[in-house]
Image: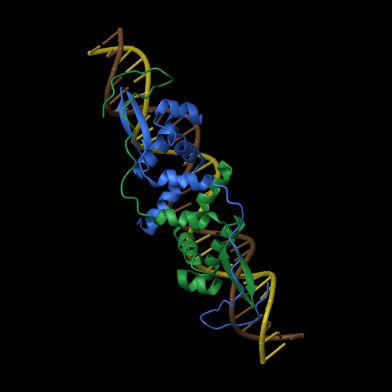
Chain colours: A blue, B green, C yellow, D brown
DNA sequence: AGATTATATTCAAATATAATAATATTTGCA
DNA sequence: TGCAAATATTATTATATTTGAATATAATCT
């Protein structure tokens, strides 16, 4: 299992609209940098910066194809995260059953809503 | 489905070690602020700030119990995210099959690794 | 070799986030 | 009513992230 640090690190790396769009696109298949640049509609250096960050944290990798760098997903958690983020949850979690919650074992008052 | 903005917003809210620890704890059950304070071992105002952020984004909610605020998980995605983050993935995603990736439909060179 | 294509790196400015300290609010109780 | 407990808010400072501009590298082609 990932350490707490690693779990949070991953979340931080994912928590950016451009990077999420990019990863959702890579889930469909390999893509080279200039195609990514066109898809995301941001500057080439900015694409490279995001790719570099994702690489640094092991989220993606690439192979060379002629002079193109073809990027693909590497960390197996990514498809799962993307799926859950897109899943439709119909309702909120149930409010926990009505039993007193204690502060250090001492119940200090009446339970209300 | 959550919009891209909302998906990223959620990730940003989760991407902090204290908040992840807190949510993992709340997954076990309701907890009041001073117990959370003790569990996380950070200052009370800091606990309140994190709780406030999580509330603002609909991740958690609370009920009153005497003078205690009892916090619990509200957004149903949270248990799923926590589970996936803790899951053990044995290997990386397979490197995509070796077919040329094109830049705008034109294949510019030899495929290598 | 030199030009061109494809991509990466570096730096600085702008912005966002987090922690701390100080203070305020709310609720129950004597 | 006034006090104490429980929690929240605000302001400030410190730190991290993001972007754009400029420049660098690396591979292929002529």
Query: Which residue is rendered at x = 42% and y = 44% of the image?
Result: A78
Q: Who is closer to the viewer here, D24 or A20?
A: A20
Q: Is residue A42 visible?
A: no
| Image coords of residue C28 (percent x, y) | 67, 82
Query: Which residue is rendered at x = 47% and y = 66% of the image?
Result: B25
Q: Is residue A101 above or below residue B95?
A: below
Horizontally, residue B60 falls left or right of residue D25, namely right
| Image coords of residue A43 (percent x, y) | 47, 29
Number of numbered discs on residues: 0
Q: Is residue A10 above or below residue B61?
A: above
For residue D28, what is the image quadrant?
A: top left
For residue A30, what is the image quadrant?
A: top left
Horizontally, residue A49 falls left or right of residue C25, namely left
Image quadrant holding the C terminus of chain A, namely: bottom right
| Image coords of residue B96 (percent x, y) | 34, 33
Q: Is residue A65 visible?
A: yes
| Image coords of residue B29 (percent x, y) | 52, 69
Horizontally, residue B59 falls left or right of residue A1, namely right
Q: Who is closer to the viewer here, B101 or B19?
A: B101
Q: Who is closer to the viewer here, C13 or A53?
A: A53
Image quadrant holding the N terminus of chain A, namely: bottom left
Q: Is residue B101 above or below residue A14?
A: above
Q: Is residue A15 above or below residue A40?
A: below
Query: Which residue is rendered at x = 46% and y = 57% of the image?
Result: B82
């Amino acid at each position: 299992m990932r350490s707490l640090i690693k779990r949070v690190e991953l979340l931080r790396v994912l928590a950016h609209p451009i990077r999420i769009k990019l990863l959702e696109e890579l889930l469909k298949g390999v893509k080279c940098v200039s195609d990514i640049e066109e898809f995301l509609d941001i500057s080439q250096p900015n694409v490279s910066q995001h790719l570099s960050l994702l690489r640094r944290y092991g989220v993606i990798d690439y192979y060379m194809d002629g002079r193109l760098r073809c990027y693909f997903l590497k960390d197996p958690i990514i498809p799962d995260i993307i799926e859950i983020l897109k899943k439709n949850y119909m309702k909120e979690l149930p409010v926990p059953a009505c039993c007193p919650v204690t502060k250090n074992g001492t119940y200090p008052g009446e339970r209300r809503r």
